Image (spheres, coloured by chain):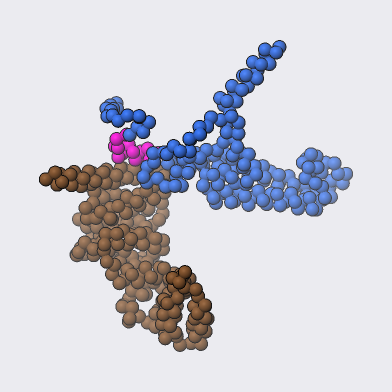
Chain colours: A blue, B brown
């Protein structure tokens, strides 16, 4: 039994180190930030930033707190601000319902509305508002995450496609910066 | 002798790399023009950088330069930036008059003229751009911006023309008075519709109304830039042409502000 527990913990540890993302254990070297990338001389800072970005699990948490976060990461400010506005409107409606009914948010969420109140029909309008605003808040979060990730990946693909194809067209000799000694090589493509 | 060999090798390799880059850009423009417009839009910044280098190197341009400028014009056309497309077509016709007659792009140009509301006189002027005597190299390069500045003044071209003029300056070309006046008008934020009227005659022969507008805008601009002397001089010129009470009040208010202005050159 004890051995099984130890094996289970070891297995979990292996899983975490192998598949975890940066909120967990993640391999990072001290001099990672000193490595200078080989950039195309026409690449803009915006493109450089976009290529270096990725939406990971920690960003999913940030997106819960900052409305439109994924779109801001993908440099899609217009959509980011729209989502931020919509989410703020959702929270505003929640506050309005609270002011109108006096029912606190935890109670509302716990009872999924006003099911604990006897005369529910009095607050029918508020109940609808609560449902719509909750859908709006959840919807903007999911849209932000899914669409933001899609936008970022598409932009990254466009940048890679552009510079990759141009490199091919320019027929520029490839330089391997990882080599530790000088040398000439011959490549044959077929 | 050794130095000459090194010099020849350097010139040859520089031109060869430059030519290779332009060719790569051209091939990419051709590759994406049949794909989604997002790719074309995304590439415009890079293509404009190559366009700038062609202008700087002109007349020692790389092979495919004319074709590249035409394809860049087509990219603008596809992304519905019709004013920029027209400018690129004009540039190509003025720099490479022997290559392709300007008016041969009938379908594109018809749409551009209609959408930009270009009059018949201006269309005639544009259609004859390839036939005009090219003159000196500087004149040839200035033909496109001068045409736009004097006659068309279409929306959305200010930045492109400023960039174009900047490239010519880099080659040591002295700008004519019209270009300098246009640059002033852009900096002073004179409305685009009025700008064209400044090029009907010499500045000295312009109507007092136009001159007054110029001096007023110039005074406001220099006040914002905290250049006290120029702000004051332009304000005084404005006063000399003022006739109504409102204009004098306007002058007084501005001179009051200029009086208390802290000149940035004193800091």
Say whether residue B41 is magenta. no
Judged left or right of residue B8, residue A71 is right
State whether residue B110 appears in this view: no
Question: In which quadrant of the rendered image does the N terminus of chain B lie?
Answer: top left
**Number of marks present in the image shown:** 0
- Is most of the magenta stretch helix, strand or loop? helix
Judged left or right of residue A164, residue A10 is right
Q: Position of residue B111 (x, y in %)?
A: 37, 58
Which residues lie in the magenta part?
Answer: A161-174
- In the rendered view, would you say B173 is above or below A132? below
Q: Position of residue B149 (x, y in %)?
A: 34, 67
Judged left or right of residue B128, residue B187 is right
Q: Residue furthest right?
A: A118
- In the rendered view, would you say B189 is above or below A30? below
Q: Residue at x 63, y 39 (%)?
A: A61
Q: Position of residue A5 (x, y in %)?
A: 68, 16
Q: Residue at x 35, y 52 (%)?
A: B48
State whether residue A117 appears in this view: yes
Q: Position of residue B177 (x, y in %)?
A: 30, 72
- In the rendered view, would you say B187 is above or below A138? below
């Amino acid at each position: 039994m004890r051995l099984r527990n130890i094996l289970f913990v070891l297995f979990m540890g292996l899983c975490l180190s192998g598949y975890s993302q940066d909120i967990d254990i993640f391999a990072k070297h001290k001099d990672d930030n000193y490595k200078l990338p080989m950039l195309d001389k026409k690449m803009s800072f915006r493109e450089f930033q976009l290529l270096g970005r990725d939406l990971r699990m920690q960003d999913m948490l940030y997106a819960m707190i900052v409305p439109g976060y994924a779109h801001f990461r993908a440099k899609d400010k217009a959509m980011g601000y729209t989502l931020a506005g919509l989410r703020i409107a959702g929270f505003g409606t929640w506050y309005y319902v609270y002011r109108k009914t006096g029912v606190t948010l935890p109670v509302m969420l716990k009872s999924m509305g006003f099911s604990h109140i006897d005369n529910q029909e009095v607050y029918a309008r508020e109940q609808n508002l609560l449902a719509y605003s909750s859908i709006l808040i959840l919807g903007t979060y999911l849209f932000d995450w899914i669409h933001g990730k899609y936008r970022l990946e598409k932009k990254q693909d466009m940048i890679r496609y552009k510079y990759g194809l141009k490199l091919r067209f320019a027929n520029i000799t490839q330089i391997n910066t990882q080599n530790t000694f000088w040398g000439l090589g011959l490549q044959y493509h077929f | 002798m050794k130095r000459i060999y090194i010099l020849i090798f350097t010139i040859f390799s520089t031109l060869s790399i430059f030519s290779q880059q332009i060719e790569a850009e051209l091939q990419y423009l051709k590759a994406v023009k049949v794909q989604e417009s997002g790719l074309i839009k995304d590439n415009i910044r890079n293509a404009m950088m190559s366009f700038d280098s062609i202008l700087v190197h002109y007349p020692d341009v790389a092979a495919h330069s004319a074709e590249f400028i035409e394809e860049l014009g087509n990219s603008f056309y596809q992304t519905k930036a019709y004013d920029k497309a027209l400018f690129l077509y004009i540039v190509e016709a003025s720099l490479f008059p022997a290559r392709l007659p300007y008016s041969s792009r009938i379908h594109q140009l018809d749409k551009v003229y209609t959408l930009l509301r270009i009059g018949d006189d201006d269309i005639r002027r544009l259609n004859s751009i390839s036939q005009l005597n090219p003159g000196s190299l500087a004149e040839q390069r200035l033909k496109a911006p001068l045409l736009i500045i004097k006659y068309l003044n279409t929306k959305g071209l200010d930045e492109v023309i400023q960039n174009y003029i900047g490239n010519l300056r880099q080659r040591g070309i002295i700008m004519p008075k019209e270009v300098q006046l246009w640059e002033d008008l852009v900096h002073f934020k004179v409305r685009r519709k009025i700008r064209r009227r400044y090029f009907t005659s010499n500045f000295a022969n312009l109507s007092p109304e136009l001159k007054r507008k110029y001096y007023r805008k110039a005074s406001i601009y220099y006040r914002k830039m905290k250049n006290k002397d120029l702000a004051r001089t332009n304000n005084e010129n404005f006063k000399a042409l003022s006739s109504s009470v409102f204009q004098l009040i306007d002058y007084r208010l501005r001179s009051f502000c200029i009086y208390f202005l802290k000149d940035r050159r004193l800091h």
